[in-house]
Image (tube, rainbow, N blue to C red):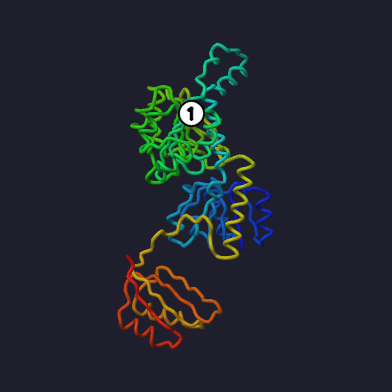
Amino acid sequence: MKVLIADKFEENGIRDLQEIGCEIIYHADLKDAALAEAIRESQADVLIVRSTKVTAEMLEAGRLSLVVRAGAGFNTIDVKAASARGVYVSNCPGKNSTAVAELAFGLILALDRRIADNVAELRAGQWNKKEYSRARGLYGRTLGLVGLGQIGREMVLRAKAFGMNVVGWSRRLTPESAAEMGIAFRQTIIEVAHECDILSIHLALTPDTRAVIETAVFEVMRPGSYLINTSRAEIVDQAALAQAIKTKNIRAGLDVFVDEPASATGEFNDSIIQLPNVYGTHHIGASTDQAQEAIAAETVRIIRTFKETGKVPNVVNLSERTPATHLLVVRHLDRPGVLAHVFNEIKAANINVQEMENIVFAGAEAAIARIGLDAPLNDETLARIRTSNSEIIETNLIKLT
């Protein structure tokens, strides 16, 4: 199995992939046309990326079967195009949650103590204890969390260590699960924003979450409160954030930006970072040695499982529900050609198979096939399936609800 790695990747991970029999093509800074050409030339089976964008043109360039995002989010991959070509897309959720939570709290502390400004003035030869000796402190403050996945839960642990109160909202959060975490449950983002001193965003970017932190959210935030975003820039309405910074003295700690350079280095011109009270980092939330080693290990696990079983852990682009309307259940002897006979009859009826499984009973004498169809088989076809092959024991057609 050929594996093309198009981003920086841990040496341990490369060695482990080689040990399971993978041929590695490693170029740590491939992107755009160069990446498409590498996919075409290498004829790789698997592509590993971190921040590099994977487009439809790249997916069409070669014979990829699997794209692994060595990280949690996968918005840089054209998942729709991958699905149309039958290419698995997988990710490594939760492996960087501790690292991201650590950076988020670093930004909170940096904003509260204005650490970057302190450093800048000292390096400029200025001593200004009068200016920087005023800080609010975190003890007893309220942290508002939007998103309570694995990163959000890591934030809860750290907030408690700092003696903070926590209120949260997530689509999957319930009053019961909030109580188990020791936080206050709120039904909307607006409610969280209204109550907190610090609002920290931990959502995946989806059509539903794009610009979900918008003007109405900033309107209810307290003047001078903090916004932390270590998820995706597009989740926050940038114009609304800029206005809140200017009119409500909102302080922002941002690790993500709308127009980030495509490569690890380059010019950066996002105007949001020029505003007062905005601290920024270079999209480094997951960039700790611990996180990268864990992500590399998970990437190896995904590829090993795919290589050995054909199954893909953490796959993100399989349909939750197929268009199947009927289920054909065929109990049969475990003999060659039985399923070929069944599929020939289904094909002759011009009906499409949406999904199937064939389970063999102990002793390998008999099996049962479950075949999802996008339309019902008529009685004549069912009769032919049953009677035209003596190794078919029984058939049953079930209408799915």
Where, quadrant-wise, is the N terminus in this rendering?
A: bottom right
Label 1 neighbourhood size at 10 Å, few (<14), some (14-19), many (20+)?
some
Looking at the rendered structure, the kind of residue marked 1 is Ile
Instruction: Kindly indicate the quadrant of the structure image that contains residue 110.
Output: top right
Where, quadrant-wise, is the C terminus in this rendering?
A: bottom left
| Residue at position x 58%, y 38% in the image | 265
Instruction: Kindly indicate the quadrant of the structure image that contains residue 169.
Output: top left
| Count of numbered circles in the view | 1
| Residue at position x 47%, y 30% in the image | 165
Locate residue 119, reporting x and y percent.
60, 21
148 above or below 250?
A: below
| Residue at position x 44%, y 79% in the image | 331
**Residue sitting nearer the eye, 122 or 375:** 375
Q: Which residue lies under the disc numbered 1?
A: 273
**Residue 183 seen in the current view:** yes
Secondary structure found at label 1:
helix
395 above or below 388?
A: above
Residue found at the far top of this picture: 130
**Residue sitting nearer the eye, 199 or 81:** 199
Locate residue 322, reporting x and y percent.
38, 63
395 above or below 85?
A: below
Locate residue 19, reporting x and y percent.
69, 59
Locate residue 330, reporting x and y percent.
42, 78
**Residue 64 seen in the current view:** no
